[in-house]
Amino acid sequence: MSIEVKVPVLPESVSDATIATWHKQVGEAVKRDENLVDLETDKVVLEVPATADGVLKEILFKEGDTVNSQQVIAIFEEGAVAAAATAAAPAEAEARTAAAAPAAAGKLDELSPAGRRVATEEGIDPSKVTGTGRDGRVTKEDLVNHGKQDSAPAAAAAPAKAAVAPTPGERPEERVPMTRIRARIAERLMQAKNSTAMLTSFNEVNLAEVSKLRKSLGEQFQKEYGVKLGFMSFFVKAAAEALKRYPVINASVDGSDVVYHGYQDISIAVSTDKGLVTPVLRDTQNLSFAEIEQGIVNYAKKAREGKLGLDDLQGGTFTITNGGTFGSLLSTPIINPPQSAILGMHTIKERPVVENGQIVAAPMMYLALSYDHRIIDGRDAVLFLVDIKNQLENPQRMLLGL
């Protein structure tokens, strides 16, 4: 039975998607739930899995093409994998390969964006690669496999010369098109810069008490809930409590209106190889420390595996970003529209502080709050930061909702 492979339903905020990579080619056997193709949107890369065992019968769009929600992009023939895989005789397979060879002698501009990057980076002539794609087209996988075949003998023959050093005086350049996700990130950053009156306020927090709490209860916490007790849950909890007391920090601008949200959906900035994404922890005002940590771990895993869905990234009323994981001492984070504020965490450094008239070393962190000055006054921004500082320096306050 033939099954139409369709683009998943896209939300209203995502108009279309781009065919990024076909992982299966026409005539190839596929198992149920195996990924057929990656679709890149403005926000995430979506996988389209096979709904049954069978064979990919026809590909209707090549890599780099733009497709819309629910559009048919391929035809899948449901059936036994073993029978489908052996249906083509060896002679027919050889005939297909022979027919594909002349068609593969395409130019570089006939490749998909991903294929062009591989060909350019590896210095591969696509006319010398046998294509396995539709109508004999050369795919990214063809180029990668061709590069592996070429590099193996060269490495064996001259291992000492494997690294190619630039010619003295050479000034190499490479032009690579932005991915849709990177282009969207750039667009939103410019939107925040040009459409908000952004200002940043700073403070610092002594994390000695939080550190003691993590040290004394961390092991028991992990045994009980299966996740580590990290710093981020304290910041999320403190932010959720502070947002209740300063609701304008949790608000957003819609035209000439200010929208106040009666809930705290906090976006957590996560860095991936495709760019920064901000999955949302929903209703953080009702979450326990364990639920927050479990949510963060789940999002981090999904981000690493490229499995974040559009629903994971929709909404959010406030954002927390942690540049400290990369060693940042101080920065001015950019607002995540349509939100009106973002909290920046930074690296923890032992610094001298005065306690009870004595100079002691303490684990200190600089905090930064960037906010839209159109609706948030400096007073509210500063008091919000002080509120977070007070909760983190006295963690029993947030445990009691004070």
Image (cartoon, rainbow, N blue to C red):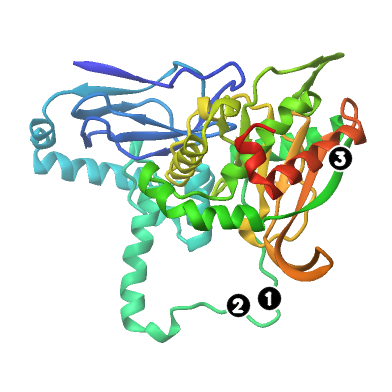
Q: Position of residue 90 (x, y in %)?
A: 10, 43
Q: Which residue is mark 1?
A: 170
Determine the CA span between mark 1 and mark 3: 52 Å
Q: Are marks 2 and 1 in contact (CB under 8 Å)?
A: yes
Residue at figure coordinates x 40%, y 54% from the top left: 143
> For the N terminus, which image quadrant?
top left
Which residue was labeled with disc 2?
Answer: 166
Give the residue type that dot 2 points to. Pro
Q: Mark 1: few, some, or many residues within 10 Å (few <14, many ≥20)?
A: few
The disc, 1 or 3, on the residue closer to the chain's N-terminal end is 1
Q: Going by the picture, which residue comes out furthest to the front? A: 356
Locate residue 46 relative to residue 195 in the image: left or right. left
The residue under label 3 is which amino acid type?
Answer: Val
**Which residue is depicted at the point 39% across and 45% down?**
139
Query: Quick one: SS at disc 1?
Result: loop
Q: Is residue 282 above or below residue 231?
A: above
